Amino acid sequence: MKNKELLNVCYKFFNRFITADKLLEELANTDISNLSKKDIEEQNKLTEEIKTIAKNTPNEMDEYVIKNKEKLKNMINRFESIPKDDKDIDFLNKQLENLKKDYEKETDSHERWLKITDCINENSYFNEVFESLTDYELLEFIAQNIAAPFPPNLTQEEFDRLVNAGIEKDEREWLWRLAFNYETRSINFDSIVEYFIKKKDGYYLAELISAVGECLNIDEIIDKIDDKELIEDLKNRKSVISHYVSEEQFNRLICKLD
């Protein structure tokens, strides 16, 4: 039985979505009814190790916590400055709400977080469970969150396998979220761009550009788009992509309607 609940709880801690205290609370409340005796023993053993570290490690606000709050505040300001229209207001408001929640929540000290993270990452049972995931399950696992600070390390080949798993089942939301999680990881997103263009999906193409525009070749994207329905759709989403698409580039795209 795959202990996905253990992975999900630990992943939330890795990415600082929950504190060590909340991690221990959620581990204590995981559903173990379908786990084997060995799985239960291994999870309990890991939980006890985490308890010991949490108890013996200082948990005061440090430089990392302060800088992270500054980063979140800048992201909030950026989203608040984006003009909203009927097509995109729900999306933008949702992102703002999530960012503000992240800004207000409690955070562990870097030392406490790092020691517990290392403990989990070095745990053989945790790694065994993680390695048992299929490409599709790993895609779903990563895509639960948007712009997670510490997604699993993936090579370009591994990333492309997840993209293919998403394309096979037309998981466009997951593909967009996958890209957002790897914005700073030197990953090529062309396969996702090409899929959204193929599907003539202006909504997800615009959100992709808005999320990872710095990682995309906008000129190449414009050159690849020739469907007038898709161009009209993107025309109505100018406010969302304007941060990364210049006026000249946008006009070059719209000229294809003539």
Image: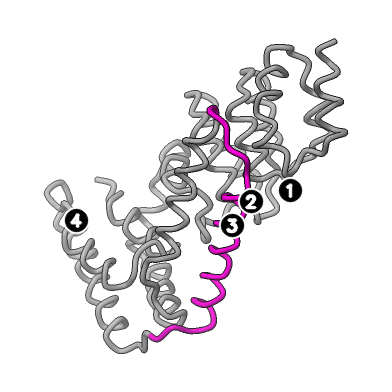
Label 2, residues with CA under 10 Å away: few <14, some 14-19, many ≥20: many
- Residue 170 is situated, as x and y percent measured from the top left of the image, at 50, 24
Labels 2 and 4 touching (C-beta < 8 A): no
Give the label on residue 30, or none: 4
Horizontal side of 160 relative to 125 (left or right) equals right
Q: Are marks 1 and 2 in contact (CB under 8 Å)?
A: yes
Task: Point out which mark residue 77 bears.
Answer: 3
Between the residue at mark 3 and the residue at mark 1, the CA separation in whole angstroms equals 18 Å
Give how far apart the Cα atoms at labels 3 and 4 are.
Answer: 37 Å
Q: Earlier in the sequence, mark 2 or mark 4?
A: 4
Disc with the residue nearer the chain's start (1 vs 2): 2
- The residues tagged by marks 2 and 4 sit, at their Cα atoms, a distance apart of 31 Å
Q: Residue at x 53, y 28 (%)?
A: 86
- Identify the residue position indicated by label 2 in the image: 183
Q: Which mark is residue 214?
A: 1
Instruction: Tell me which segment is drawn in magenta.
Output: 60-87
Disc 2 is placed on an element classified as loop
Picture layout, residue 29 above or below residue 209: below
Looking at the rendered structure, the kind of residue marked 3 is: Asn
Location of residue 116 by image quarter: bottom left
Callout 3 touching callout 4 (CB < 8 Å):
no
Q: Residues within 10 Å of mark 4 (few under 14, many from 20)?
A: few
